[in-house]
Image (cartoon, coloured by chain):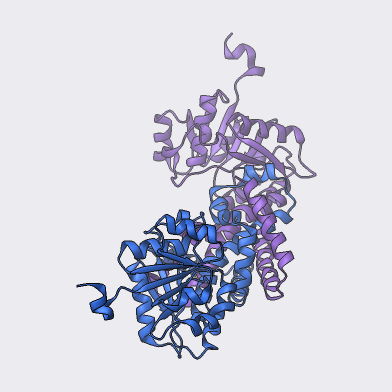
Chain colours: A blue, B purple
Protein backbone atom coordinates (compact mmCIF):
# COMPACT_ATOMS: atom_id res chain seq x y z
CA UNK A 1 0.00 0.00 0.00
CA UNK A 2 1.41 3.34 -1.00
CA UNK A 3 1.30 6.16 1.53
CA UNK A 4 -1.11 8.01 -0.74
CA UNK A 5 -3.80 5.37 -0.60
CA UNK A 6 -4.05 5.54 3.21
CA UNK A 7 -3.71 9.23 3.90
CA UNK A 8 -5.62 8.87 7.21
CA UNK A 9 -2.71 6.77 8.51
CA UNK A 10 -0.02 8.88 6.88
CA UNK A 11 2.91 9.13 9.31
CA UNK A 12 2.75 12.54 10.94
CA UNK A 13 4.84 15.55 10.06
CA UNK A 14 6.82 16.69 13.09
CA UNK A 15 7.99 20.30 13.30
CA UNK A 16 10.67 21.19 15.84
CA UNK A 17 11.28 24.87 16.55
CA UNK A 18 14.72 25.36 18.05
CA UNK A 19 17.14 22.59 17.11
CA UNK A 20 19.39 22.35 20.16
CA UNK A 21 20.17 19.37 22.38
CA UNK A 22 16.52 18.73 23.24
CA UNK A 23 15.09 19.46 19.79
CA UNK A 24 17.79 17.36 18.15
CA UNK A 25 17.19 14.48 20.55
CA UNK A 26 13.44 14.60 19.86
CA UNK A 27 14.24 14.41 16.13
CA UNK A 28 16.57 11.43 16.58
CA UNK A 29 14.24 9.65 19.00
CA UNK A 30 11.16 10.21 16.82
CA UNK A 31 13.01 8.94 13.77
CA UNK A 32 14.37 5.87 15.50
CA UNK A 33 10.95 4.99 16.94
CA UNK A 34 9.04 5.72 13.73
CA UNK A 35 6.97 8.46 15.35
CA UNK A 36 7.21 10.85 12.38
CA UNK A 37 7.19 10.54 8.62
CA UNK A 38 8.79 13.89 7.93
CA UNK A 39 10.76 16.00 10.41
CA UNK A 40 11.04 19.74 9.82
CA UNK A 41 13.42 21.97 11.76
CA UNK A 42 12.57 25.63 12.29
CA UNK A 43 15.47 27.83 13.33
CA UNK A 44 17.44 30.99 12.81
CA UNK A 45 20.80 29.83 11.45
CA UNK A 46 20.62 28.45 7.88
CA UNK A 47 24.13 26.94 7.96
CA UNK A 48 23.45 25.09 11.18
CA UNK A 49 20.05 23.85 9.98
CA UNK A 50 21.46 22.73 6.65
CA UNK A 51 24.20 20.80 8.48
CA UNK A 52 21.56 19.06 10.60
CA UNK A 53 19.64 18.07 7.46
CA UNK A 54 22.83 16.85 5.79
CA UNK A 55 23.54 14.79 8.89
CA UNK A 56 20.12 13.15 8.46
CA UNK A 57 18.71 14.57 11.69
CA UNK A 58 15.80 16.29 9.91
CA UNK A 59 14.28 16.06 6.45
CA UNK A 60 13.66 19.74 5.83
CA UNK A 61 14.50 23.03 7.45
CA UNK A 62 13.27 26.60 7.32
CA UNK A 63 13.86 29.91 9.04
CA UNK A 64 10.24 30.87 8.37
CA UNK A 65 7.93 30.02 11.26
CA UNK A 66 4.76 30.00 9.12
CA UNK A 67 6.31 27.69 6.54
CA UNK A 68 7.60 25.32 9.20
CA UNK A 69 4.34 25.12 11.12
CA UNK A 70 1.96 25.00 8.13
CA UNK A 71 1.92 21.29 7.32
CA UNK A 72 2.87 19.90 10.71
CA UNK A 73 0.74 17.43 12.67
CA UNK A 74 2.90 17.77 15.78
CA UNK A 75 4.75 20.95 16.73
CA UNK A 76 7.31 20.93 19.55
CA UNK A 77 8.70 24.28 20.66
CA UNK A 78 12.25 23.89 21.98
CA UNK A 79 13.33 27.51 22.18
CA UNK A 80 14.10 29.45 25.36
CA UNK A 81 11.05 30.05 27.58
CA UNK A 82 10.77 33.75 26.77
CA UNK A 83 10.82 33.04 23.02
CA UNK A 84 8.10 30.43 23.44
CA UNK A 85 5.96 32.88 25.46
CA UNK A 86 6.48 35.53 22.78
CA UNK A 87 5.70 33.34 19.75
CA UNK A 88 3.07 31.01 21.13
CA UNK A 89 -0.14 32.75 20.01
CA UNK A 90 1.35 33.12 16.50
CA UNK A 91 2.27 29.42 16.44
CA UNK A 92 -1.23 28.41 17.54
CA UNK A 93 -2.76 30.64 14.85
CA UNK A 94 -0.51 29.07 12.19
CA UNK A 95 -1.03 25.44 13.24
CA UNK A 96 -3.37 23.45 11.00
CA UNK A 97 -6.64 22.08 12.38
CA UNK A 98 -6.08 18.89 14.34
CA UNK A 99 -2.38 19.55 14.89
CA UNK A 100 -1.09 19.39 18.44
CA UNK A 101 1.43 21.87 19.84
CA UNK A 102 3.63 21.41 22.88
CA UNK A 103 6.93 22.72 24.21
CA UNK A 104 9.86 21.72 26.43
CA UNK A 105 10.13 24.91 28.53
CA UNK A 106 11.31 24.32 32.09
CA UNK A 107 8.72 26.68 33.60
CA UNK A 108 5.09 26.35 32.67
CA UNK A 109 2.80 28.99 34.22
CA UNK A 110 3.78 31.82 31.85
CA UNK A 111 3.80 29.58 28.78
CA UNK A 112 0.39 28.07 29.49
CA UNK A 113 -1.00 31.52 30.28
CA UNK A 114 0.29 32.75 26.91
CA UNK A 115 -1.39 29.78 25.18
CA UNK A 116 -4.69 30.42 26.92
CA UNK A 117 -4.91 34.01 25.71
CA UNK A 118 -5.48 32.36 22.33
CA UNK A 119 -8.74 30.66 21.35
CA UNK A 120 -6.86 27.58 20.21
CA UNK A 121 -7.25 24.49 22.39
CA UNK A 122 -4.58 22.41 20.69
CA UNK A 123 -1.73 23.31 23.07
CA UNK A 124 -0.59 21.37 26.12
CA UNK A 125 2.64 22.29 27.89
CA UNK A 126 5.41 19.77 28.57
CA UNK A 127 8.66 19.67 30.46
CA UNK A 128 10.81 16.63 29.84
CA UNK A 129 13.36 16.56 32.66
CA UNK A 130 16.32 15.53 30.56
CA UNK A 131 19.47 17.33 29.61
CA UNK A 132 23.20 17.25 29.67
CA UNK A 133 26.10 19.58 30.24
CA UNK A 134 26.47 19.68 26.47
CA UNK A 135 24.40 21.82 24.19
CA UNK A 136 23.48 21.77 20.48
CA UNK A 137 22.03 19.13 18.17
CA UNK A 138 25.48 17.65 17.56
CA UNK A 139 25.29 16.25 21.11
CA UNK A 140 21.75 14.98 20.64
CA UNK A 141 20.87 11.37 21.42
CA UNK A 142 17.86 9.26 20.48
CA UNK A 143 17.91 7.99 24.07
CA UNK A 144 18.18 11.31 25.90
CA UNK A 145 14.63 10.89 27.19
CA UNK A 146 14.82 7.20 28.09
CA UNK A 147 13.85 6.83 31.72
CA UNK A 148 13.42 10.59 32.20
CA UNK A 149 10.32 12.09 33.72
CA UNK A 150 8.20 14.39 31.57
CA UNK A 151 5.63 16.77 33.00
CA UNK A 152 2.48 17.33 30.95
CA UNK A 153 0.44 20.26 32.23
CA UNK A 154 -3.33 20.47 32.24
CA UNK A 155 -5.77 23.18 33.29
CA UNK A 156 -9.56 23.56 33.38
CA UNK A 157 -9.38 24.61 29.74
CA UNK A 158 -7.23 21.72 28.51
CA UNK A 159 -8.59 19.40 25.82
CA UNK A 160 -7.79 16.07 27.46
CA UNK A 161 -7.50 14.34 24.09
CA UNK A 162 -4.65 16.73 23.25
CA UNK A 163 -3.07 16.09 26.66
CA UNK A 164 -3.26 12.35 26.00
CA UNK A 165 -1.59 12.70 22.60
CA UNK A 166 1.18 14.86 24.08
CA UNK A 167 1.65 12.34 26.92
CA UNK A 168 1.87 9.53 24.35
CA UNK A 169 4.56 11.43 22.45
CA UNK A 170 6.79 11.58 25.56
CA UNK A 171 6.05 8.00 26.52
CA UNK A 172 7.00 6.92 23.00
CA UNK A 173 10.31 8.76 23.47
CA UNK A 174 10.94 6.76 26.67
CA UNK A 175 9.64 9.14 29.36
CA UNK A 176 7.54 8.51 32.45
CA UNK A 177 4.75 11.08 32.25
CA UNK A 178 3.50 13.15 35.20
CA UNK A 179 0.33 15.20 34.75
CA UNK A 180 -0.09 18.35 36.84
CA UNK A 181 -1.24 21.95 36.74
CA UNK A 182 1.32 24.49 35.47
CA UNK A 183 1.43 26.11 38.94
CA UNK A 184 2.06 22.81 40.70
CA UNK A 185 4.78 22.02 38.15
CA UNK A 186 6.52 25.32 38.77
CA UNK A 187 6.28 24.93 42.55
CA UNK A 188 7.64 21.37 42.53
CA UNK A 189 10.45 22.24 40.12
CA UNK A 190 11.32 25.26 42.27
CA UNK A 191 11.43 23.03 45.31
CA UNK A 192 13.16 19.99 43.81
CA UNK A 193 15.58 21.64 41.37
CA UNK A 194 15.92 25.35 42.08
CA UNK A 195 15.83 25.45 45.89
CA UNK A 196 18.68 22.92 46.27
CA UNK A 197 20.84 25.14 44.08
CA UNK A 198 19.96 28.28 46.02
CA UNK A 199 20.40 26.47 49.35
CA UNK A 200 23.93 25.60 48.29
CA UNK A 201 24.47 29.22 47.25
CA UNK A 202 23.10 30.54 50.57
CA UNK A 203 25.43 28.25 52.55
CA UNK A 204 28.47 29.22 50.51
CA UNK A 205 27.49 32.89 50.69
CA UNK A 206 27.33 32.62 54.49
CA UNK A 207 30.78 31.01 54.49
CA UNK A 208 32.02 33.83 52.26
CA UNK A 209 30.78 36.38 54.77
CA UNK A 210 32.70 34.73 57.63
CA UNK A 211 35.83 36.11 55.97
CA UNK A 212 37.88 32.97 56.49
CA UNK A 213 40.77 32.25 54.18
CA UNK A 214 39.97 29.78 51.37
CA UNK A 215 43.07 27.73 52.25
CA UNK A 216 41.79 27.28 55.81
CA UNK A 217 38.28 26.57 54.57
CA UNK A 218 39.63 23.86 52.30
CA UNK A 219 41.19 22.13 55.33
CA UNK A 220 37.89 22.27 57.20
CA UNK A 221 35.57 21.30 54.40
CA UNK A 222 34.33 17.73 54.79
CA UNK A 223 32.33 15.47 52.46
CA UNK A 224 29.01 16.68 53.94
CA UNK A 225 29.66 20.29 52.96
CA UNK A 226 31.11 19.27 49.60
CA UNK A 227 28.07 17.17 48.66
CA UNK A 228 25.58 19.71 49.93
CA UNK A 229 27.09 22.63 48.05
CA UNK A 230 28.37 20.90 44.89
CA UNK A 231 25.64 22.39 42.71
CA UNK A 232 26.72 25.93 43.61
CA UNK A 233 29.45 25.44 40.98
CA UNK A 234 26.83 25.83 38.23
CA UNK A 235 26.73 28.72 35.79
CA UNK A 236 25.64 32.03 37.41
CA UNK A 237 24.13 33.16 34.08
CA UNK A 238 22.03 30.02 33.71
CA UNK A 239 20.81 30.12 37.30
CA UNK A 240 20.02 33.81 37.23
CA UNK A 241 17.87 33.10 34.17
CA UNK A 242 16.16 30.13 35.84
CA UNK A 243 15.37 32.22 38.94
CA UNK A 244 13.92 34.91 36.74
CA UNK A 245 11.79 32.54 34.67
CA UNK A 246 10.35 30.78 37.69
CA UNK A 247 10.55 33.78 40.00
CA UNK A 248 7.22 33.51 41.76
CA UNK A 249 7.55 29.83 42.63
CA UNK A 250 11.26 30.09 43.48
CA UNK A 251 10.88 33.06 45.82
CA UNK A 252 7.90 31.39 47.49
CA UNK A 253 9.89 28.21 48.12
CA UNK A 254 12.92 30.18 49.35
CA UNK A 255 10.75 31.97 51.91
CA UNK A 256 9.21 28.68 53.08
CA UNK A 257 12.59 26.98 53.43
CA UNK A 258 14.08 30.09 55.09
CA UNK A 259 11.27 29.94 57.65
CA UNK A 260 12.13 26.30 58.30
CA UNK A 261 15.71 27.34 59.15
CA UNK A 262 14.32 29.76 61.72
CA UNK A 263 11.97 27.11 63.11
CA UNK A 264 14.89 24.69 63.51
CA UNK A 265 16.88 27.45 65.26
CA UNK A 266 13.98 28.03 67.68
CA UNK A 267 13.76 24.32 68.48
CA UNK A 268 17.47 24.21 69.23
CA UNK A 269 17.31 27.38 71.35
CA UNK A 270 14.34 25.96 73.27
CA UNK A 271 16.11 22.60 73.64
CA UNK A 272 12.98 21.05 72.14
CA UNK A 273 14.57 17.65 71.63
CA UNK A 274 11.32 15.87 70.75
CA UNK A 275 10.35 18.19 67.87
CA UNK A 276 13.90 18.28 66.56
CA UNK A 277 14.22 14.51 66.65
CA UNK A 278 10.86 14.15 64.86
CA UNK A 279 12.01 16.38 62.01
CA UNK A 280 15.43 14.72 61.74
CA UNK A 281 13.82 11.29 61.68
CA UNK A 282 11.12 12.25 59.19
CA UNK A 283 13.75 13.82 56.90
CA UNK A 284 15.98 10.76 57.17
CA UNK A 285 13.09 8.44 56.29
CA UNK A 286 11.84 10.52 53.33
CA UNK A 287 15.37 11.08 51.99
CA UNK A 288 16.06 7.35 52.08
CA UNK A 289 12.89 6.73 50.09
CA UNK A 290 14.12 9.12 47.38
CA UNK A 291 17.10 6.86 46.54
CA UNK B 1 71.58 3.50 77.89
CA UNK B 2 68.78 2.15 80.02
CA UNK B 3 65.59 4.23 80.31
CA UNK B 4 66.43 4.74 84.03
CA UNK B 5 69.70 6.57 83.41
CA UNK B 6 67.98 9.23 81.28
CA UNK B 7 64.79 9.91 83.11
CA UNK B 8 64.54 13.41 81.62
CA UNK B 9 64.19 11.84 78.18
CA UNK B 10 62.03 9.00 79.38
CA UNK B 11 59.34 8.38 76.74
CA UNK B 12 56.12 9.92 77.99
CA UNK B 13 53.24 8.07 79.58
CA UNK B 14 50.06 8.64 77.57
CA UNK B 15 46.70 8.24 79.27
CA UNK B 16 43.60 7.93 77.10
CA UNK B 17 40.23 8.30 78.79
CA UNK B 18 37.52 6.70 76.67
CA UNK B 19 38.86 3.98 74.37
CA UNK B 20 36.59 4.21 71.33
CA UNK B 21 37.46 4.75 67.68
CA UNK B 22 39.33 8.01 68.35
CA UNK B 23 41.01 6.94 71.59
CA UNK B 24 42.02 3.63 70.05
CA UNK B 25 43.41 5.35 66.95
CA UNK B 26 45.42 7.76 69.10
CA UNK B 27 46.87 4.73 70.94
CA UNK B 28 47.79 2.96 67.70
CA UNK B 29 49.15 6.12 66.06
CA UNK B 30 51.20 7.09 69.14
CA UNK B 31 52.61 3.59 69.40
CA UNK B 32 53.54 3.37 65.73
CA UNK B 33 55.18 6.79 65.76
CA UNK B 34 57.00 6.26 69.08
CA UNK B 35 55.19 9.15 70.76
CA UNK B 36 54.61 7.30 74.03
CA UNK B 37 56.53 4.87 76.20
CA UNK B 38 53.54 3.56 78.08
CA UNK B 39 49.90 3.85 77.06
CA UNK B 40 47.22 3.65 79.72
CA UNK B 41 43.52 3.30 78.95
CA UNK B 42 40.94 4.64 81.37
CA UNK B 43 37.42 3.33 80.88
CA UNK B 44 34.35 1.80 82.40
CA UNK B 45 34.21 -1.74 81.00
CA UNK B 46 36.95 -4.02 82.41
CA UNK B 47 36.37 -6.79 79.83
CA UNK B 48 36.64 -4.39 76.93
CA UNK B 49 39.73 -2.69 78.34
CA UNK B 50 41.42 -6.03 79.06
CA UNK B 51 40.72 -7.13 75.49
CA UNK B 52 42.35 -3.92 74.20
CA UNK B 53 45.42 -4.56 76.33
CA UNK B 54 45.56 -8.21 75.18
CA UNK B 55 45.38 -6.95 71.58
CA UNK B 56 48.44 -4.80 72.30
CA UNK B 57 46.58 -1.52 71.82
CA UNK B 58 47.50 -0.25 75.30
CA UNK B 59 49.96 -1.36 78.01
CA UNK B 60 47.75 -0.90 81.04
CA UNK B 61 44.14 -0.18 81.81
CA UNK B 62 42.11 1.01 84.76
CA UNK B 63 38.55 1.99 85.61
CA UNK B 64 39.86 4.41 88.23
CA UNK B 65 40.31 7.93 86.91
CA UNK B 66 42.80 8.97 89.63
CA UNK B 67 44.98 5.90 89.04
CA UNK B 68 44.95 6.40 85.27
CA UNK B 69 45.80 10.11 85.37
CA UNK B 70 48.37 9.96 88.21
CA UNK B 71 51.55 9.09 86.31
CA UNK B 72 50.60 10.43 82.89
CA UNK B 73 52.61 13.06 80.98
CA UNK B 74 49.90 13.45 78.34
CA UNK B 75 46.20 12.97 79.00
CA UNK B 76 43.73 12.84 76.11
CA UNK B 77 40.03 12.82 76.99
CA UNK B 78 38.05 10.94 74.36
CA UNK B 79 34.71 10.62 76.11
CA UNK B 80 31.43 12.26 75.05
CA UNK B 81 31.44 16.06 75.42
CA UNK B 82 29.14 16.10 78.45
CA UNK B 83 31.36 13.59 80.28
CA UNK B 84 34.44 15.68 79.53
CA UNK B 85 32.71 18.84 80.81
CA UNK B 86 31.66 16.98 83.95
CA UNK B 87 35.05 15.41 84.76
CA UNK B 88 37.45 18.06 83.56
CA UNK B 89 38.19 19.96 86.78
CA UNK B 90 38.77 16.63 88.55
CA UNK B 91 41.14 15.49 85.78
CA UNK B 92 43.08 18.76 85.98
CA UNK B 93 43.35 18.42 89.77
CA UNK B 94 44.67 14.86 89.41
CA UNK B 95 47.17 15.56 86.63
CA UNK B 96 50.79 15.68 87.76
CA UNK B 97 52.77 18.95 87.44
CA UNK B 98 54.03 19.43 83.91
CA UNK B 99 51.51 17.05 82.39
CA UNK B 100 49.39 18.35 79.50
CA UNK B 101 45.71 17.60 79.13
CA UNK B 102 43.64 17.83 75.98
CA UNK B 103 40.45 16.30 74.55
CA UNK B 104 38.81 15.41 71.24
CA UNK B 105 35.34 16.86 71.88
CA UNK B 106 33.62 18.19 68.78
CA UNK B 107 32.39 21.38 70.50
CA UNK B 108 34.79 23.50 72.46
CA UNK B 109 33.21 26.49 74.23
CA UNK B 110 31.68 24.49 77.11
CA UNK B 111 34.73 22.30 77.56
CA UNK B 112 37.19 25.19 77.64
CA UNK B 113 34.88 27.09 80.00
CA UNK B 114 34.87 24.06 82.33
CA UNK B 115 38.68 23.94 82.20
CA UNK B 116 39.00 27.62 82.99
CA UNK B 117 36.93 27.35 86.17
CA UNK B 118 39.97 25.46 87.44
CA UNK B 119 43.26 27.14 88.41
CA UNK B 120 45.19 24.67 86.26
CA UNK B 121 46.75 26.07 83.08
CA UNK B 122 47.78 22.74 81.59
CA UNK B 123 44.66 22.20 79.48
CA UNK B 124 44.22 23.11 75.82
CA UNK B 125 41.19 21.88 73.88
CA UNK B 126 41.45 19.98 70.61
CA UNK B 127 39.13 18.72 67.94
CA UNK B 128 40.67 16.39 65.40
CA UNK B 129 38.24 16.25 62.47
CA UNK B 130 38.55 12.56 61.82
CA UNK B 131 36.11 9.73 62.20
CA UNK B 132 34.38 6.92 60.44
CA UNK B 133 30.96 5.31 60.33
CA UNK B 134 32.40 2.61 62.56
CA UNK B 135 32.81 2.91 66.29
CA UNK B 136 34.93 1.25 68.97
CA UNK B 137 38.66 0.60 69.32
CA UNK B 138 38.38 -2.57 67.22
CA UNK B 139 37.93 -0.29 64.20
CA UNK B 140 40.81 1.99 65.21
CA UNK B 141 43.60 2.80 62.77
CA UNK B 142 47.06 4.27 63.30
CA UNK B 143 46.38 6.42 60.23
CA UNK B 144 42.91 7.71 61.14
CA UNK B 145 44.35 11.20 61.61
CA UNK B 146 46.64 11.26 58.57
CA UNK B 147 45.78 14.30 56.54
CA UNK B 148 42.93 15.32 58.86
CA UNK B 149 42.60 18.82 60.27
CA UNK B 150 42.85 19.26 64.02
CA UNK B 151 41.64 22.37 65.82
CA UNK B 152 43.65 23.49 68.85
CA UNK B 153 41.81 26.14 70.86
CA UNK B 154 43.45 29.02 72.64
CA UNK B 155 42.11 31.82 74.82
CA UNK B 156 43.62 34.79 76.71
CA UNK B 157 44.37 32.41 79.56
CA UNK B 158 46.08 29.72 77.48
CA UNK B 159 49.69 28.77 78.24
CA UNK B 160 51.08 28.90 74.71
CA UNK B 161 53.75 26.33 75.55
CA UNK B 162 50.97 23.87 76.36
CA UNK B 163 49.16 24.81 73.14
CA UNK B 164 52.36 24.15 71.20
CA UNK B 165 52.82 20.71 72.80
CA UNK B 166 49.21 19.80 72.06
CA UNK B 167 49.62 21.03 68.47
CA UNK B 168 52.77 18.91 68.14
CA UNK B 169 50.90 15.83 69.35
CA UNK B 170 48.32 16.18 66.55
CA UNK B 171 50.96 16.98 63.96
CA UNK B 172 52.88 13.89 65.01
CA UNK B 173 49.69 11.87 64.45
CA UNK B 174 49.48 13.26 60.90
CA UNK B 175 47.11 16.22 61.35
CA UNK B 176 47.19 19.73 59.96
CA UNK B 177 46.69 21.98 62.97
CA UNK B 178 44.40 25.03 63.05
CA UNK B 179 44.58 27.36 66.06
CA UNK B 180 41.47 29.33 67.00
CA UNK B 181 39.33 30.49 69.90
CA UNK B 182 36.76 27.97 71.19
CA UNK B 183 33.93 30.26 70.04
CA UNK B 184 35.33 30.61 66.55
CA UNK B 185 35.77 26.83 66.39
CA UNK B 186 32.16 26.24 67.37
CA UNK B 187 30.89 28.82 64.88
CA UNK B 188 32.94 27.42 61.99
CA UNK B 189 32.02 23.83 62.78
CA UNK B 190 28.36 24.86 63.02
CA UNK B 191 28.66 26.52 59.64
CA UNK B 192 30.79 23.95 57.83
CA UNK B 193 29.47 20.70 59.33
CA UNK B 194 26.20 21.24 61.13
CA UNK B 195 24.46 23.79 58.88
CA UNK B 196 24.84 21.63 55.73
CA UNK B 197 23.13 18.80 57.56
CA UNK B 198 20.30 21.00 58.77
CA UNK B 199 19.96 22.66 55.35
CA UNK B 200 19.42 19.21 53.86
CA UNK B 201 16.88 18.48 56.61
CA UNK B 202 15.06 21.78 56.00
CA UNK B 203 14.80 21.06 52.26
CA UNK B 204 13.52 17.53 52.80
CA UNK B 205 11.14 18.75 55.49
CA UNK B 206 9.73 21.29 53.03
CA UNK B 207 9.30 18.52 50.45
CA UNK B 208 7.58 16.41 53.11
CA UNK B 209 5.09 19.21 53.75
CA UNK B 210 4.16 19.44 50.06
CA UNK B 211 2.37 16.13 50.59
CA UNK B 212 3.53 14.62 47.31
CA UNK B 213 3.73 10.85 47.01
CA UNK B 214 7.24 9.42 47.49
CA UNK B 215 6.92 7.43 44.26
CA UNK B 216 6.28 10.66 42.31
CA UNK B 217 9.05 12.45 44.18
CA UNK B 218 11.47 9.70 43.24
CA UNK B 219 10.67 10.31 39.56
CA UNK B 220 11.31 14.03 39.97
CA UNK B 221 14.41 13.88 42.11
CA UNK B 222 17.55 14.73 40.12
CA UNK B 223 21.25 14.53 41.01
CA UNK B 224 21.24 18.12 42.35
CA UNK B 225 18.63 17.36 44.99
CA UNK B 226 20.20 13.99 45.77
CA UNK B 227 23.66 15.47 46.36
CA UNK B 228 22.37 18.44 48.30
CA UNK B 229 20.28 16.35 50.69
CA UNK B 230 22.35 13.18 50.96
CA UNK B 231 23.53 13.99 54.49
CA UNK B 232 19.92 14.09 55.74
CA UNK B 233 20.16 10.29 55.82
CA UNK B 234 22.35 10.54 58.95
CA UNK B 235 21.31 9.31 62.38
CA UNK B 236 18.60 11.50 64.00
CA UNK B 237 19.94 10.62 67.46
CA UNK B 238 23.49 11.65 66.60
CA UNK B 239 22.39 14.92 64.99
CA UNK B 240 20.01 15.82 67.77
CA UNK B 241 22.93 15.40 70.17
CA UNK B 242 25.25 17.49 67.97
CA UNK B 243 22.66 20.29 67.75
CA UNK B 244 22.29 20.22 71.51
CA UNK B 245 26.02 20.29 72.21
CA UNK B 246 26.68 23.16 69.85
CA UNK B 247 23.29 24.76 70.26
CA UNK B 248 24.30 28.41 70.49
CA UNK B 249 26.54 28.37 67.41
CA UNK B 250 24.18 26.14 65.39
CA UNK B 251 21.08 28.22 66.05
CA UNK B 252 23.02 31.40 65.25
CA UNK B 253 24.20 30.00 61.93
CA UNK B 254 20.72 28.68 61.08
CA UNK B 255 19.25 32.14 61.62
CA UNK B 256 21.95 33.74 59.47
CA UNK B 257 21.46 31.24 56.64
CA UNK B 258 17.66 31.48 56.96
CA UNK B 259 17.97 35.26 56.52
CA UNK B 260 20.03 34.67 53.39
CA UNK B 261 17.17 32.61 51.92
CA UNK B 262 14.83 35.55 52.51
CA UNK B 263 17.35 37.97 51.01
CA UNK B 264 17.62 35.79 47.87
CA UNK B 265 13.81 35.68 47.69
CA UNK B 266 13.66 39.48 47.85
CA UNK B 267 16.24 39.82 45.07
CA UNK B 268 14.20 37.47 42.87
CA UNK B 269 10.93 39.26 43.67
CA UNK B 270 12.56 42.63 42.91
CA UNK B 271 14.11 41.20 39.73
CA UNK B 272 17.45 42.46 41.05
CA UNK B 273 19.49 40.61 38.44
CA UNK B 274 22.78 42.33 39.32
CA UNK B 275 22.77 41.42 43.02
CA UNK B 276 21.61 37.90 42.30
CA UNK B 277 24.26 37.36 39.66
CA UNK B 278 26.93 38.69 42.03
CA UNK B 279 25.97 36.20 44.73
CA UNK B 280 25.71 33.29 42.29
CA UNK B 281 29.11 34.13 40.84
CA UNK B 282 30.78 34.64 44.22
CA UNK B 283 29.35 31.35 45.46
CA UNK B 284 30.48 29.53 42.33
CA UNK B 285 34.01 30.92 42.67
CA UNK B 286 34.36 30.16 46.39
CA UNK B 287 32.84 26.68 46.02
CA UNK B 288 35.30 25.85 43.26
CA UNK B 289 38.17 26.91 45.50
CA UNK B 290 36.98 24.46 48.18
CA UNK B 291 37.64 21.45 45.92
Rendered location of residue A99, percent (x, y): 40, 81
The x and y percentages for residue A217 are: 66, 46
Q: Residue furthest right?
A: B156
Q: Horizontal placement of B37 versus A172: left or right?
A: right
Q: Quadrant of the C terminus of chain B?
A: top right
Task: Work out which quarter of the rendered image holds the N terminus of chain B and state it.
Answer: top right
Relative to A186, A145 lies left or right: left
Please give the count of numbered marks on the rendered protein. Answer: 0
Q: Position of residue A184 (x, y in %)?
A: 49, 79
Residue drawn at (59%, 56%), measured in percent from left and top? Answer: A234
Please state which of residues A111 and A199 is positioned toward the viewer in this rendering: A111
| Of B69 and B23, the residue lying toward us | B23
Residue lying at the far left in this picture: please name it. A1
- For image coordinates 52% across by 56% down, the residue present is A135
Residue A275 seen in the figure:
no
Which x, y percent locates residue A95?
46, 82
| Left or right of residue B20: residue A145 | left
Q: Residue furthest top?
A: B1
A18 over A109 or under it: above or below:
above
Foreground of the two, B208 or B48: B208
Answer yes or no: is residue B140 visible. Answer: yes
Displayed quadrant of residue B219: bottom left
Amino acid sequence: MSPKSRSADKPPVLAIAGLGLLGGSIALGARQRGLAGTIVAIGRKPDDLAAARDAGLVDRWTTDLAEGIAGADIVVLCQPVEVIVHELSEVLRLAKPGAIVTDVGSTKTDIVRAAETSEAANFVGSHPMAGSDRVGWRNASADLFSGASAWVTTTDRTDLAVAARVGNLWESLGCRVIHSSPQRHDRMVALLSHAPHLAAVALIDQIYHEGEDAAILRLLCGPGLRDTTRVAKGSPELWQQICRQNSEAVSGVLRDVGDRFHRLATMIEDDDAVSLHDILERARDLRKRLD
